[in-house]
Amino acid sequence: MDQLVNNWINLSDSTSQSHTKITLTSGETSVQAQLNDTKAAQEFKALLPVTLSMTRMGEHEYYSSLSTNLSEDDKTQTGYEISNLAYWTPGDLFAIYFDEPDKAPEGLIILGNITDDIDKIRELGNPAEITISLAE
């Protein structure tokens, strides 16, 4: 039985290592997040650290253009989950989703998600200068 528990713990540790931990910082606010292991997410990781001037769209997202376009080889989807970090392929934009939109956007590649209190993102101003870096 102890061996089964140890195997499960080791499997859990290796699974969590497939995500890259990142930090989003705006002024005094710091938010933890993670990137998944898709091609686009790894290309985004290569851009870090990066500071983006992000515009608030309604009461559901922040978005910004990137200095370089990400790969569109990954499967796109319509809609997102609250806390997703995504690449919106029609506009080549990076987006942080913190609430539900009126209409679900199409052409998203999910890069990762916020693992911290999403209210920290909701409380940022417009525009928000957000620095995204690898977590220490």
Image: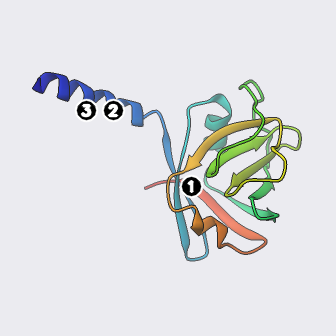
Q: Would you name the residue on which mark 1 appears?
A: 133
The residue sitting at 75% across, 42% down in the picture is: 87
Q: Nearer the viewer, residue 40 or 83?
A: 83
Q: Give the residue furthest to the right.
A: 90
Q: Would you name the residue on which mark 3 appears?
A: 9
Mark 3 in CB contact with mark 2 (< 8 angstroms): yes
Question: Mark 1: few, some, or many residues within 10 Å (few <14, many ≥20)?
Answer: some
Where in the figure is residue 21, as x and y percent of width and height?
48, 47
Q: Identify residue type, mark 1.
A: Ser
Which image quadrant is residue 2 in? top left
SS under mark 1: strand
Mark 3–mark 2 distance (CA, rounded to whole Å): 5 Å
Mark 3 in CB contact with mark 1 (< 8 angstroms): no
Question: Mark 3: few, some, or many residues within 10 Å (few <14, many ≥20)?
Answer: few
Question: Mark 2: few, some, or many residues within 10 Å (few <14, many ≥20)?
Answer: few
Q: Would you name the residue on which mark 2 appears?
A: 12
The residue sitting at 82% across, 64% down in the picture is: 58
Q: Identify residue type, mark 3.
A: Ile
As drawn, 107 above or below 120: above
Q: Give the residue furthest to the front.
A: 102
SS under mark 3: helix
Quadrant for the C terminus in the image? bottom left
Where in the figure is residue 124, as x and y percent of width and height?
67, 72
Mark 3–mark 1 distance (CA, rounded to whole Å): 28 Å
